[in-house]
Image (cartoon, rainbow, N blue to C red):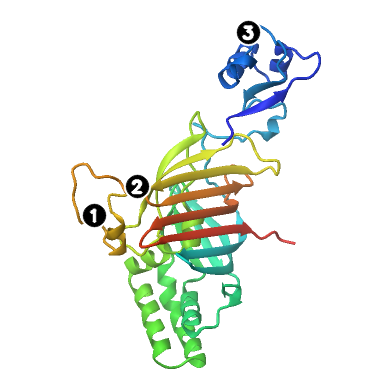
Amino acid sequence: MQKYNKHTVQKDETLKSIATLYGLDKDVLKHFHNNHCAVKDMILINLNGQKELFVPRTAVADKTLLVQFGKGNSLTLQPENTVRRYSVVITIEKGEDKNELKYETSVRWLKTEKGQQFFEIDRTSNLYLNEEEVNEIADLLAYRTSKVLYPLQISTDEHGKFETVENAEAFSKRWAAVKEELYKEFEGETVDEYCRKIEKVISEPEALNLYIKNDYFIRALFLGIYRSFGNEYKTEMTVTFPVVDNAIEPSYRVTLETDPLKEETGLITIEGKGKLYEEREIDDFIRKSPFSLIIKDNPVMNEEGTFRIISYLKQENTLPKSLYLECSIMLQEEKKISVSVSEIDEK
């Protein structure tokens, strides 16, 4: 994130007049500029030929450009009465193989209770695989059986991080009708197999939560980015993400930053970058081991993976208008998941 702005010095401007323009003490402005400029451009007492001055990022004439943070420069998720429709694109890459999944979904805020936020998520379109509507029998059955889960109600913690499914009891009630429709359209062992799979998911709470935790859209939207960013507008966090099939998700150390100034579009930016931080080695992940098979006193951490997210908010307390998340890990070859989410503007 940019740490400063630049002011182009105009004719007849003085150090004091520029400081007044931005609501700063002139000595504060001089000190800030001197800490960022080249030696030849340093201010000794007054301006002496400088063409540009470095000014603090939050020093702007138009105060409406400033993000209105809470205590500790915090952003808090408080999306009362929010309904959003999103276009979702999920790309899964492994070596040379690449598949892209597209669909539309809606997210509706339900309530706030004891620091938790509750939302309802619904699929609002068909599923498209590599630009074509899903029509392969296996893909179609996977999609059609999973429709029993929607509308899906979930809860998040105070940071906006996904916690659990809240309406699990509804799935069993819906399943009879969904199953009946499936058998009107399909028959044979394949449909039996997919029905058994979804029945196992909806009948076991742990299996259900694990199933939803592997939903890349939900995990990206509800990653938990609403927090205190401190004086430097940045914070450290540990992120896990289901980039591979493993009982214990890979862990990433991420630096999360926000810009105290809104973009020209009026949006608030939150950006995170980080690396894999795991005792488990590549072979452990290939074997799907939930822990390192070799215990070392001073392990060399596996950093063969990256994590990145950039999210844009309309307001300080709302769900993102758009976001992009990318998570990778090295196995025999690199595997990468990317999630692109964009709000669908209502016409």
Residue at image location 45% in from the left, 85% down from the top: 179
| Callout 3: SS | loop
Location of mark 3 (residue): 44
Q: Position of residue 8 (x, y in %)?
A: 73, 24
Contact check, label 2 and label 1, Cβ < 8 Å: no
- Label 1 crowd (10 A; few <14 / some 14-19 / many >=20): some
| Callout 1: SS | loop
| Callout 2: SS | loop
Relative to residue 88, is residue 145 drawn left or right?
left
| Earlier-in-chain disc, 2 versus 3 | 3
Q: Quadrant of residue 127?
A: bottom right
Decide which of 13, 312 is in the foreground and name it: 13
Q: Which image quarter holds the C terminus?
A: bottom right
Relative to residue 85, is residue 227 drawn left or right?
left
Q: Position of residue 143 (x, y in %)?
A: 50, 77
Location of mark 2 (residue): 277
Q: Position of residue 266 (x, y in %)?
A: 68, 42
Residue type highlighted by circle 2: Tyr
Decide which of 172, 232 is in the foreground and name it: 232
Residue type highlighted by circle 3: Leu
Location of mark 1 (residue): 292
Residue type highlighted by circle 1: Ser
